[in-house]
Structure formats: C-alpha cells, structure tokens
Amino acid sequence: QVQLVESGGGLVQAGGSLRLSCAASGRTWNIDVMAWFRQAPGKEREFVAAVVGSVNSMPYYADSVKGRFTISRDNAKNTMYLQMNSLKPEDTAIYYCAAMYGRRWPAQSRYQYDAWGQGTQVTVSS
C-alpha cells in the first residue's frame, strides 16, 4: 500500500498563496490518479482537483477553484503539488491527498480512492 504525507498548509490572508505537497512512498508504481480533497468543519469531504495519468497527465478541477488552483505531479519525486492562489476564506479546510490504483470514474468521487493522507490545515483569514 502507498503512504501519503501532506505538507505546506498554514495560515494566510485572503488573496494570498500557498503550495501544498503530497509525498508518496511504498507501493507507488501503478498509481494512475492522484487528487486533492478538502473538508471544512461540519461539511462533507469535497473534491478539489485531480491529475489523471502518470504520463501526459490531465488535470481536473472543481468549479470553485478553477483558475485559482493548479495541480501538478512529479513522478520522479513521487510527489504531487497544489498551487493555490487568490485564496478566499471559503477555502479554509483540511486538505487531503488521495491516490488511486488504476483508473476509475468519476475521479471526483472520494469513494474511488485507495489511499489517503492525514491532511494538512489551510486557514484563510479575511
């Protein structure tokens, strides 16, 4: 099984930026889809972004973050990133990294994923 460790969360003012990282170790060789989800207090865990394919990867974004967030993947380092710009208070949540062996759709569904990290807190102040 793969182990996922997130880092890069913190406190930032509205309009600021953060870059999250997700380092994968262990059984990584057939992970095809990696994604970021987030969960705010009292809310369900929701899809943020996914990168599909280990070669010629395709990004997918939730409408709420499109144009502000960028997902990327460095296979040589077994690391995924989420660059978050123009942050808003409503982006405040715990952000989770997820990995999927093979490819199942929809990639926006949290039930498709095989492994999860422990999460990193992102707090955006107004």
Image (spheres, helix red, strand yellow):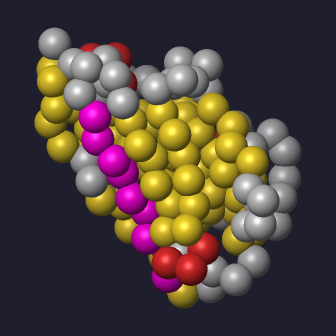
Whole-percent x and y of residue 31?
70, 71
Q: Residue at x 36, y 30 (%)?
A: 85
Which image quadrant is residue 41 in?
top left
Depth check, front residue: 67 or 104: 67
Q: Residue at x 56, y 53 (%)?
A: 72
Whole-percent x and y of residue 125?
15, 20
Quadrant of the snapshot with the C terminus: top left
Whole-percent x and y of residue 65?
51, 24
Quadrant of the snapshot with the N terminus: bottom right
Whole-percent x and y of residue 5?
38, 67
Q: Is residue 104 left or right of residue 60?
A: right
Depth check, front residue: 96 or 69: 69
Q: Is residue 120 magenta?
A: no
Which image quadrant is residue 83 in?
top left
Q: Is residue 22 magenta?
A: yes
The span shown in magenta is 17-25
User: Is residue 98 visible in the rendered structure shown here?
Assistant: no
Q: Is residue 122 left or right of residue 2?
A: left
The answer to whether 116 is drawn above or below residue 40 in the figure is: below
Magenta stretch: dominant SS?
Answer: strand
Which image quadrant is residue 10 in?
top left
Residue, far bottom: 26
User: Is residue 80 visible in the rendered structure shown here?
Assistant: yes
Q: Residue at x 43, y 70 (%)?
A: 23
The answer to whether 105 is drawn above or below residue 90 in the figure is: below
Q: Residue at x 46, y 26 (%)?
A: 68
